Amino acid sequence: KAGVTQTPRYLIKTRGQQVTLSCSPISGHRSVSWYQQTPGQGLQFLFEYFSETQRNKGNFPGRFSGRQFSNSRSEMNVSTLELGDSALYLCASSLSGISEAFFGQGTRLTVV
Amino acid sequence: AQRVTQPEKLLSVFKGAPVELKCNYSYSGSPELFWYVQYSRQRLQLLLRHISRESIKGFTADLNKGETSFHLKKPFAQEEDSAMYYCALSRQGAQKLVFGQGTRLTINP
């Protein structure tokens, strides 16, 4: 079956702009989580959605937001981009909150 | 606070030698522990989790609650084991992983 798909794979944005990243989970998976990966901070949890509701949230500013649609696809939005937002953003899906998480290949965001 | 520490950023061993990747954690409660692996140009994937108590690709990991450790071990390393390894924890029932900084394992021929 198809894995977790993230689009786009690469993105270049200018400071102050906003960006939307998309994640399509494995069919049947209802939980979608987002992570930010940077060389300095490593992998950090952003938030998790389950059945269209945010269930867990990490320690990121309000500029980072997300949503989940009825088909379990999820989007992540970052407003007023800063240089420090440059990172690899990973999405993971799972059947429920206690099962194995399957990761996508990530979207590499560069803010200039 | 929840924290995962992997003390070695880089680890290099020879093929056929034993491998141990260290992971220590701090957590007030009963966490669920995982090892994730990322091979070159591949996505992050689950290697094993403590509740399953399985051996995957020859790797095992035992949860030591007294020492708050979850070290990953393999008795005989193979070249295909070269990868980035991440230890992670979550609260039981929560899909919120806290990752260590990772250890890059290189197996020399």
Image: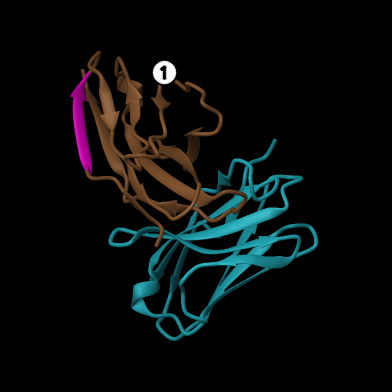
Chain colours: A cyan, B brown
At a point 31% along the width and 51% down the height, the residue shown is: B101
Q: Where is residue A111 in the image (x, y as percent from the top left)?
A: 38, 74
Question: Which secondary structure, mark 1?
Answer: loop
Residue marked by disc 1 = B58
Report whether B38 appears left or right of A52: left
Quadrant location of the C terminus of chain B? top left
Q: Height in image: B52 above or below A12?
A: above
Report whether A33 appears left or right of B18: right
At a point 42% along the width and 34% down the height, the residue shown is: B63
Report whether A36 appears left or right of A52: left
Q: Height in image: B33 above or below B90?
A: above
Camera-nearest residue between B6 and A74: B6
Amino acid type for the residue under numbered disc 1? Gly
Question: As drawn, which residue projects farthest toward the right?
Answer: A70
- Quadrant housing residue B86: top left
At a point 56% along the width and 29% down the height, the residue shown is: B52
Chain of the residue under label 1: B
Q: Height in image: A108 above or below A20?
A: above
Q: Where is residue A56 in the image (x, y as percent from the top left)?
A: 59, 65
At a point 54% along the width and 60% down the height, the residue shown is: A34
Camera-nearest residue between B95 and B79: B95
Camera-nearest residue between B74 and A82: B74
Range of the magenta residues? Answer: B8-14
- Quadrant housing residue B65: top left
Specify the principal SS of the magenta part. strand
Q: Where is residue A48 in the image (x, y as percent from the top left)?
A: 61, 61
Magenta residue check for B9: yes
